[in-house]
Amino acid sequence: MTSLSSPQPIDVLVVGGGNAGFSAATAAKETGARRVVLIEKAPEEWAGGNSYFTAGAFRTVHNGVADLLPLVNNVDPEKAKLIDMEPYTTEDFQKDMHRICSGRSDPALSRILVEDSNAAIKWLAKNGIRFQLSFNRQAYEVNGRFKFWGGMALKTEDGGKGLIADHQATVQQLGIEVYYSTPAKSIVTSSSGTITGIVVAHKGEDTLIQTKSVVLAAGGFEANPRMRAQYLGPGWDLARVRGTPYNTGEVLEIAIRDVGAKQAGHWSGCHSTCWDANAPANSGDREISNEFTKSGYPLGLMLNSNGVRFVDEGIDLRNYTYAKFGRAIHEQPDGVAFQVWDQRTIGWLRDEEYRDERVQKIWGETLEDLAQKLTQQVGLNAPDRFVEAVKEYNDAVYAFQNEQPNKKWDPAIKDGLSTQSSTKKLALAKSNWALPLDQGPFMAVKVCCGVTFTFGGLAINPETTAVTSTSNKEMSNLFCVGEMLGGLFYGNYPGGSGLTSGTVFGRRAGSAAAKVATLKTREDASLPRQTRSARL
Ligand SMILES: Cc1cc2nc3c(=O)[nH]c(=O)nc-3n(C[C@H](O)[C@H](O)[C@H](O)COP(=O)(O)OP(=O)(O)OC[C@H]3O[C@@H](n4cnc5c(N)ncnc54)[C@H](O)[C@@H]3O)c2cc1C
């Protein structure tokens, strides 16, 4: 293998080895780049960035179950007959992006995300990524049928762990070189402003990698407490990191510093979720991974340590609310909350998040008993108010049930079972799935805010992902994808869009970078020998 510091420029250099970077590297090779190198800051035992920690959920436009069955390996013909899955159309995904991101998502970026999503999944499958239908996360079994909900149906086999293992196998097969423990430190340009190389730290030395094009895919700044406090706001340095500790934002800063890259998007915004209060502070756990997520709140209630509800737990289907409820918890006293259920819904909680060995559960025979135990064991400050709040909620549910006795509870749709009737309304509604909490024993778990990834990033040309400069010029051979890309998500996001974005824009970046490299190779070949290196 040629060394990293070879005098001959490589074709495409990808910075960052998560889903976006691996997708870009694969696409570059597929488009004809000869030498593709991927550098990764983390050591190999931390391979895969945040993408490793995911549930592997991909949101994609599809035409219903028949469109997805050829891609998945966990549905036999008998099971297929029991599936209820509405198509998820381009309009559906587009509307979700518009609604969930409050109309702020860059229209060109979100259009491409949506329109390329189906082809991107099929391209991944062709490149060795194993997909499954997400029965455990996105379907409820109702009357013997699997009812898919929330517009999302696909996940990778073995979640993010499987996704990264498959990507690694593919890039190895394609002859793409991957160097771990090799962080990017600066971007080098020619006098005309063209990118000519990246300086990396490699085996203890600063090394210049000369390259014809670069794809930046180095994640956001979610694992950098200083930048979180600086951009997300006071107190965000204390939020817990859900994924890799290596996404510390320096490549964003390097691009802004070295080539005047323009910033875009929601720099004070991030994806953050309900997260186990006993999870580690500064990074995810490679084994437990996404199982620290605690997303069973639509089936129950969430109260803060003063015994006060603070969100409408049933305002929408879980995968449209979970990415913003972390922030809501972060804003509560001590940044914590308690999720509570009774016997009606405990059995519906997902095993991977709520099984006995995964989470500390607090039980009480009565609401008063539960409140006492929460106070003694995990920091509830106002047990009386806690009991009062749940009872007031129950009264509102009873009033609704009296008024609309025929309405049926159904967790797979927005069922309209709420706390708001003509005789009683709560100041803060629970708009769907509102069942009373009156059948003990009751169960609660303590949650905090886990930060997933940051929304602020670099401005790009949506078609090619070429980075834009502060003077609004497009850089011809610098591309940017994944969490580093700004302008796509604002305030919230439709679950499963992060991985899809990484592949949709990663493919475009890899392909554009390969084309630039091929062009440079041709131009270079036509120059007299002595002037070739001077051009780069
Ligand atoms: C617990 C959890 C669950 C999630 N579940 C889902 C899900 O199911 N579906 C979904 O769509 N999204 C999910 N997400 C979000 C998803 O992880 C991201 O949107 C997506 O993986 C980002 O991909 P990426 O390639 O941009 O970043 P990453 O996968 O984080 O890759 C970035 C890489 O860049 C490397 N890097 C950083 N700095 C440098 C440097 N200086 N030089 C070289 N390399 C560098 C990092 O080490 C990292 O490996 C989840 C996230 C978490 C944390």
Image (cartoon, rainbow, N blue to C red):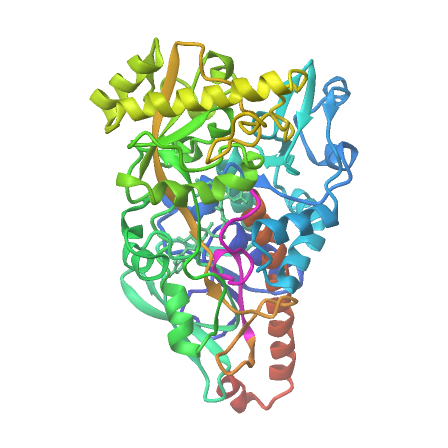
Relative vertical location of residue 510 with respect to residue 23 in this rendering, above or below:
below
Relative vertical location of residue 252 with respect to residue 246 in this rendering, above or below:
below
Instruction: Using the rendered view, name the quadrant where residue 318 is placed.
Output: top right
Instruction: Using the rendered view, name the quadrant where residue 372 is placed.
Output: top left
On the picture, is 359 further left or further right than 156? Answer: left
**Residue drawn at 55 percent across, 45 percent down:** 167
Q: Residue 75 or 238: which is nearer the viewer?
A: 238
| Number of numbered labels in the structure image | 0
**Residue drawn at 52 percent across, 35 percent down:** 159
Question: Magenta stretch: residue 482 in it?
Answer: yes
Q: Residue 490 or 155: which is nearer the viewer?
A: 490
Q: Where in the figure is residue 165, as x and y percent of width and height?
A: 51, 40
On the picture, is 442 further left or further right than 318? Answer: left
Relative vertical location of residue 194 with respect to residue 319 in this rendering, above or below:
below
Relative vertical location of residue 170 with respect to residue 458 in this rendering, above or below:
above
Q: Residue 427 or 31: which is nearer the viewer?
A: 427
Instruction: Using the rendered view, name the quadrant where residue 131 is placed.
Output: top right
Asked if residue 284 can be seen in this view, the reply is: no
**Residue drawn at 35 percent across, 69 percent down:** 207
On the picture, is 509 further left or further right than 448? Answer: right
Asked if residue 180 can be seen in this view, the reply is: yes
Q: Where in the figure is residue 58, as x and y percent of width and height?
A: 60, 42
Q: Can you name the residue that lies furthest to the left here?
A: 376
Q: Where in the figure is residue 256, as x and y percent of width and height?
A: 41, 73
Magenta region = 477-495
**Residue drawn at 36 percent across, 63 percent down:** 250
Secondary structure character of the magenta stretch overall: loop
Question: Magenta stretch: residue 376 in it?
Answer: no
Q: Where in the figure is residue 332, as x and y percent of width and height?
A: 32, 41
Q: Can you name the residue that lies furthest to the front here?
A: 423
